[in-house]
Amino acid sequence: MTNLPTISSLTDASWSPATWRARPALQQPAWPDRGALESVLDAIRALPPLVTSGEVESLKSQLASAARGERFVLQGGDCAESFADCTSERVASQLKLLLQMSLVLVHELRVPVVRVGRIAGQYAKPRTSDTETRGGITLPSYRGDNVNSPAFDADARTPDPALLMAGYERAAITLNFMRSLADSGFADLHHPEQWDLEWMSHSPLGAEYRRMVDSIGDSLRHIDSMEGMLPGGRGRVEFHASHECLLLDLEEALVRTVPRREGHYLLSTHMPWIGLRTASPGSAHVEFLRGVANPVGVKVGPGTSPEDAVAMVRTLNPHREPGKVALIHRMGARRIAATLPEIVRAVSAANLPVLWICDPMHGNTEIVTPAEGAWAGRAIKTRKFAHIVAEIEQAIEVHASCGTVLGGMHFELTGDPVTECTGGARGLSDEQLARAYRSQIDPRLNSEQALEVAMLVARRLRSSRLSSPVQCPVRRAGS
Ligand code: PEP
Ligand code: CO
């Protein structure tokens, strides 16, 4: 059998997994011992990869259909995963929450939902400052469990390359458990009782969620009664993994070529994304990801110029391959109306196929100082539920008016009952944040808040899709 070259294999001969090294790479840790780093990377290079090229290609084609409005992407998980959270309960509760949200989205939108976790490798974080000072002592900032530890002491904060291997192992354990859960009927919708939630009894949206679960259960039973046995194991659900592609030394060690496929694959995750702080046309991170066949997310913010957005998409996807690039916009509820339309228009005018995803979290972070309670007078990072919903609603309007498709949403969320974002059906106040604030970096939606967002915006998305049919102004690759 001859191997036809895939679009992604037609990469520029000037690219190799190491060409990023000629560019200034932002947000890299200052590893104290380069030799120790190299030996950990050699060990990782010798190990099997974490995902397969077949899974990556399958996700890419699903993302291409989401860009056309035929699917919807739900991307979500912790801001930063921690090694301590690699437990069966925690992984299962993250997946369960993504499933519950996708159930709501499927019910309203009537299209398949592509679930992409911020999971199995979201262990490295960009930081505003390289150092942190407390009580006159200055130490390196915490950069995620792949690099150092959050405790404020010199040992904990010194970057340790052994943590990269610990992260690789935890990612492998997490992916193994995700695949086993998916294969073993974890998400079987024939048993709606497992979809019941405590919040249904006190949330105004609870009754509606109950109706959705019942209606999906009824449809499945109806299909079963007509078909007899389940064709192709309908109990199986798919999950994909994603993380910010930040530590380029580590990611380079997981670039592989595979038999019977052309080109290079980054097999640390299915869908790497470039964070806002490292997303610019000439950046080392764009250089690194332009040569891999994976679908790639790129964060764009209120400071991203339309020219830069277009330049990054062109560089990352020179052959205009559908599903290859997702622009993840995170403008903030107050700035999206002024900043998103010109980026959308520029990308459309350049005729570039892009999957548009709204991240309503990162532009809406704010510092509050509770007036009373356990954390009175303390500055706390939070996000308001109303701003998160408002940003998505405006994103729906912008895309409808530009004739483009909002193909997905990106959330920071957790199945744990945390109190990190304010508002929602329980009306969580600034004073209540101290009750269960666990995030090391950014505030996440808890499961109740995440489901409420899904329910509130799913209806808006549906009516927008019904009233403004999609006119995708892009050519298919090769046409
Ligand atoms: C993140 O997704 O956690 C993040 C840091 O986002 P951004 O790069 O958009 O600021
Ligand atoms: Co974050």
Image (spheres, rainbow, N blue to C red):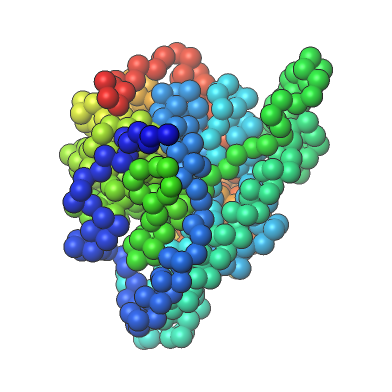
Q: Position of residue 469 (x, y in %)?
A: 41, 14
Locate the N terminus by quadrant: top left
Between residues 198 and 86, which one lies in front from this camera angle? 86
Q: Position of residue 301 (x, y in %)?
A: 31, 45
Residue 231, placed above or below residue 167: above
Between residues 280 and 260, which one lies in front from this camera angle? 260
Between residues 230 and 299, which one lies in front from this camera angle? 230
Residue 193, placed above or below residue 422: above
Residue 283, placed above or below residue 63: below
Q: Which residue is drawn at 44% across and 78% down?
A: 160
Q: Position of residue 181 (x, y in %)?
A: 69, 47
Left or right for 344, reference 381: left
Q: Position of residue 110 (x, y in %)?
A: 58, 21
Left or right for 284, reference 294: left
Q: Find residue 200 and report its image quarter.
A: top right
Residue 160, placed above or below residue 317: below
Specify whether residue 108 is in view. yes
Specify whether residue 145 is in view. no
Locate the C terminus by quadrant: top left
